[in-house]
Image: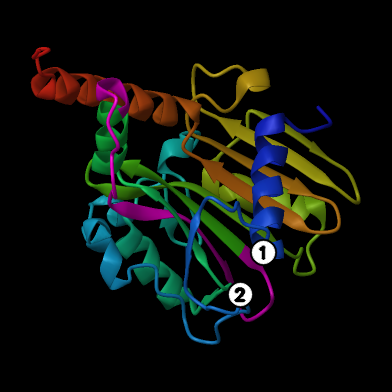
Amino acid sequence: MHGSGSWTFASIALVMVALSGTYPAVAQRIGSPTGHPDPRPIGMTPEPYGLEIYDTAIAGRPILEGDPATFELFGFKLGMSVREADRNAKRLGLHFNGGNLTNPSFDGRVKMQAASLLGRNAGSVPRVLERTSMTDANGHHYLLQFLPMEAGATLSSITYIGSWDGNSPAQYLAALQAKFGKPTSKYTNTESLDARWCSKGDLLALCDTRPAFGAIGTRDVNLVLLMGNRARTDLDHRIEVRAASVAATERKAPAF
C-alpha cells in the first residue's frame, strides 16, 4: 500500500514547525532567550516544573512485537516522565533547539475549567512541559511531545528525522521488522519506504486511536511513535469530570 495516513504527516508537520522556530504565540517559551540552539545538553526539567520530577517503571519495559505501546525509539518510550526522557536525551548526547513549549498541568486545566463553570477568573495555574526539540551530533532531529497527566507531563509522541545512513529502504525496513515485528502495512521501492504498525483493533485507515508507529522515507527517514488520540480524549474527559466536581463543591447559593 502506497501513501501515508494523515496521522503521520500531521506529526511530521509538527516537527517542521518546531525546528523552524515558529512556535504558537500562546505558548510559554523558556530556554535560550535568543531562540538559537543552545550548545549545552538539553535540560527538560528546570526548577519551575517540579511537578514533572517523578519516575516510572517504563524504561525497563520489554518491547513486544506487534504492540506499539511497548515500542521505543532510541531509548524513548511512550509514558515516560520528563525526567526519564531528559535522562535518556543526555545519554544520547542530544542538544536543545532553543525553547520548550509548556501547557497548563492537569491540576491547572482542572482549575481553569472549574473557574469557567463558576464564571470566575482562574488566575495563574501551574504549567508542565508540552514539547521540546533536539538535535544530535549528526544533525538528526528529535521532537518529544507530552500530555499533562495527573502525575505530571507524560511522553505521548516521539518523532525522529534522520538519514538512511547508507541503507536502502528495503534494508531499513528489514531492521525495523527485526526490532518491532511485522508491520500492519508496508510499501517500499528503491527510493522510498512507508510502513505502519497499528495497535490491535485499530483499522489501518484510523491508525491513530491507540498507540501506533510509522516509518516514512524518501530523501530523509521519518519515524513517528504515537500514544494515540484515545489517550488525549480520555485525559480531557477526566479533567472535565474533576472540574465539574470542583465546581459543584465551590458553587455558592445566590445571596440577595
**On the rendered structure, is 129 left or right of 162?**
left
Q: Secondary structure at mark 1?
A: loop
Residue 150, image x and y in percent? 23, 40
Contact flag, marks 1 and 2 (Cβ < 8 Å): yes
Q: Which residues are magenta?
A: 116-141
Q: Quadrant of the N terminus?
A: top right
Which residue bears the numbered disc 1?
A: 21
Residue 137 part of the magenta segment: yes
Query: Gap between marks 1 and 2, in whole Å?
Result: 7 Å
Q: Is residue 94 above or below residue 256?
A: below
Residue at (43%, 31%) from the top-left corner?
232
Residue 169, image x and y in percent? 80, 52
Q: Amino acid at mark 2?
A: Gly
State the mark number for residue 101. none
**Residue in front for this viewpoint, 47 or 149:** 47
**On the rendered structure, is 125 left or right of 171?**
left
**On the rendered structure, is 169 left or right of 248?**
right
**On the rendered structure, is 3 left or right of 180?**
right
